Image (cartoon, coloured by chain):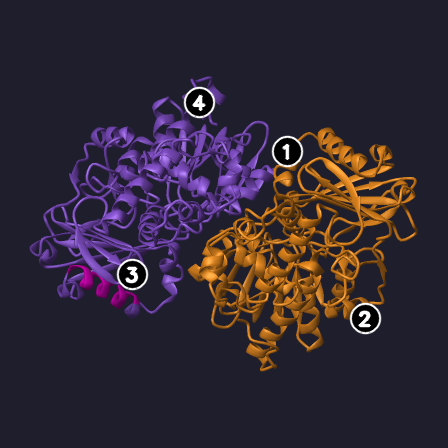
Chain colours: A purple, B orange
Amino acid sequence: MSRHAEVIVVGAGLAGLEAAARLRAAGRDVLVLEARERVGGRTWSVPVGGATVDFGAQWTGPGQPRMAARITGLDLETRPTFTEGRKVLDRRGRVSTYRGTIPRIAPWKLVEAQLSMWRVEAACRRVPKEAPWRAAGAESLDGQTALTWVGSRVWSEDVVDLVNAATRVIFGSELGELSALHFLHYLHSGGGLQKLVDSHGGNQDARVVGGAQRIAEGLAGLAGEVVLGAPVRRIDQDPQGVDVHADDRSFRARRVVVAVPIALAGRIRYSPALPTLRDQLVQRVGMGGTVKVFARYDRAFWREGGLSGEGVGTRGTVNVAFDDEGPAGQPGLVAFVTGRAARGWAERPVAERREEVLATLARWFGPEATHPTDYAEADWAREPYSGGAPIATFPPGSLSAMGPALRAPVGRIHWAGTETALESSGFMEGALESGERAAAEVLATEWGGEVLRPTG
Amino acid sequence: MSRHAEVIVVGAGLAGLEAAARLRAAGRDVLVLEARERVGGRTWSVPVGGATVDFGAQWTGPGQPRMAARITGLDLETRPTFTEGRKVLDRRGRVSTYRGTIPRIAPWKLVEAQLSMWRVEAACRRVPKEAPWRAAGAESLDGQTALTWVGSRVWSEDVVDLVNAATRVIFGSELGELSALHFLHYLHSGGGLQKLVDSHGGNQDARVVGGAQRIAEGLAGLAGEVVLGAPVRRIDQDPQGVDVHADDRSFRARRVVVAVPIALAGRIRYSPALPTLRDQLVQRVGMGGTVKVFARYDRAFWREGGLSGEGVGTRGTVNVAFDDEGPAGQPGLVAFVTGRAARGWAERPVAERREEVLATLARWFGPEATHPTDYAEADWAREPYSGGAPIATFPPGSLSAMGPALRAPVGRIHWAGTETALESSGFMEGALESGERAAAEVLATEWGGEVLRPTG
């Protein structure tokens, strides 16, 4: 006995829900299977100390048309990220403050930083968004880490450190883990390095009132039936359709959209087996490491001292911090522990973790940081149905050799998820785009709909 | 209703069977669960054209004491690899022949090749076998690919090509996929680069008569009960023991040894969840790509032409080839398609694959190569319970940050497999060593036995 639908979507994150909502809008009978007891995937909004904070994806900004449309369509609102005041730079323990995007460093380094940024911007534009494996020199770019690539173009260790700090928060990985090809492709997809790191007018421009998970909840209302607590373990294809097996239930449909992180899609069993290129890819593309820490306070003491609450550390535990004011003005900071510092975080003593984070916030923003009224950690490596955050890490050699298997449908199986997006890959915007593309693929293949764009 | 044992071993490859045999020899009640309908894991001996060939691991050599002891103890025999005659070098399509280990290239390049080899040998000795993450400069070595590391030490592209050719056959991966730290650690564990590539007196010195799988079959007789066709899907721990769930059966024991490839261990579900560091590691460590091709002939025409049957190609489809004479003198060649050339091999047309391989063998050894009496391919990426071959690829950033989770037991779960070995990691010898170590861990923890060595 199994519930039948026309299309099954695996994963009720933004990608899966967007696909489901679009399929339903096209008149299809859709069923969404979600492993967790909530929708939202890598968006997750939780009350901490009287204000809802975003444990997961948090910001949106200009140039994200799908996000803007969904936010408006779902009657949601955004509010700007607080950016007034000076920012903190912690350069290997030496703390200073600055204004603007690039921290105050020695003038020649500032020039070099700007030149480096231009060099990165120019290089990333040469990596095709739809098929990075076709970039000129793709194999060579993919045979080195982003650290090697940046390190051979930038002389100052300070500037390399800054690029690495930006990388850690964007990818949850160190420059030394990423393929240079993946690094440049991601930057191109996201609109360039400058846009990625700007908190004003860039991708950290605004937040959704009530939390980004509200978008997923809104989409779930448009997506047809959503079954929670149904982790998919096996997908069997036959000439007529697919059988999708959760722990204790089975479902049948004509097509399935798998919209879960790539590494976790590898933990589903497929019959017949997936193409070897796809299996080899999913064996390699692990999730980044990100822990978000929320400290709520009685007063925004950093603002009183002329600081915006934004800080960047090039080494140490905390990678970046931002002001995280609640919708009713509740003061708070959000700090990111990322990359190497996040690896094995869950295995370290709770008190030690808290002390390290708060000590860093105190050095950056003042001693009052050590006395939050509320404190919470979101360690995405502990989430069995995310496996890490924010996005998948493509190690050297994977994208150029196995990239073509990233989006290519396998029989009746289609792939979504922000890592498969052409535009704004890695962002909520990319998740929506990938869901839109997967829905169009399904409609075109099964019901003769229009294909929105080539799948690369 | 579940079968009880004192120890369950998951995976009847050499590592798992060695662990089981040692536990049984120590008087323990052992149960081995194997997903396939055969034992042997990455050893698999199959008749092709009247001779048994090794689809999987094939060679052993001096300095592999556990292999020597098991071969003798199981009444097996080895026979030497045929090495008489000249070898073929295919340097980007230019075919020449040579004698000795290092191909005939321009004299200054020969000097450079020898110097490079010494440099590699010296560097690899500085990476501790038991804890590569503690090497001086581990993070820096792990932040670059082996291609970057070799490329910055070797001037001649020809020499880099040769090192890459050796790497492809050893790892199933390109230099540009491997972390430099992993590359050097592997070489150190295996006794150095020279020993790894020598077909005479090195690790390709001899083969087991009847095939390497005979060792696994012999060990299975010493290992207690071996249940075939029982792929393990879930392992639950409680304070008293472990429940190990296969598709339709469950088993219970006090401890479990998981002896499957790291990436596939990640497809088992664990309750409670594994430490995040372990989960992050298994998300990244994919298997190499190796296709072994066997061509059997009426005559060993290459020998008649003064060739040994050994060839190396620095580009193109075939990476290396060796004489693969059967035990009764049946002529044959074995060719390796590896790394990038092996990716997606299974998805290419059969006729095209065969034509490409045989055309290369013909260029190397003579036109008769295009007319084999028998032809067979072993594509390890198609093996769902191997996921690739010969070994796991540690991408940049993984070993230095997550390496400590490679061998560390998790409660009642112990880890074996050649990738966890201290000596001869990646070889059959390493598989046996890892099984020996895991058995000692179990005995020490549960029954107060002696610990053979620290687990790093």
Between discs 1 and 2, the one toward the N terminus? 2
The residue at which mark 3 appears reads as A92
Mark number for residue A443?
Answer: 4
Please, which residue is most extreme toward the front here?
B108
In three-dimensional space, the C-alpha distance between marks 2 and 3, rounded to whole angstroms, equals 58 Å
**Residue A348 sits in which quadrant?**
bottom left
Both marks 2 and 4 on one chain:
no
Disc 3 crowd, CA 10 A, few/some/many (<14, 14-19, 20+) = few
**Which chain does the residue under circle 1 lie in?**
B
Q: Which label lies toward us, 1 or 3?
A: 3
| Callout 3: SS | loop
Q: Is residue B389 left or right of residue B273?
A: right
| Callout 2: SS | helix
Highlighted magenta segment, given as a residue range = A353-365
The residue at the point 53 percent across, 30 percent down is A412
**Which chain does the residue under circle 4 lie in?**
A
The reply to whether the C-beta atoms of the residues labelled 4 and 3 are less than 8 Å apart is no
The reply to whether the C-beta atoms of the residues labelled 4 and 1 are less than 8 Å apart is no
The residue at the point 61 percent across, 67 percent down is B422
Q: Is residue A362 magenta?
A: yes
**Which chain does the residue under circle 2 lie in?**
B
Mark number for residue B347?
Answer: 1
Residue B215 makes an appearance in the image: yes
Q: Is residue B238 magenta?
A: no
Q: Is residue A189 left or right of residue B21?
A: left
The residue at which mark 2 appears reads as B73
In three-dimensional space, the C-alpha distance between marks 4 and 1, rounded to whole angstroms, equals 26 Å
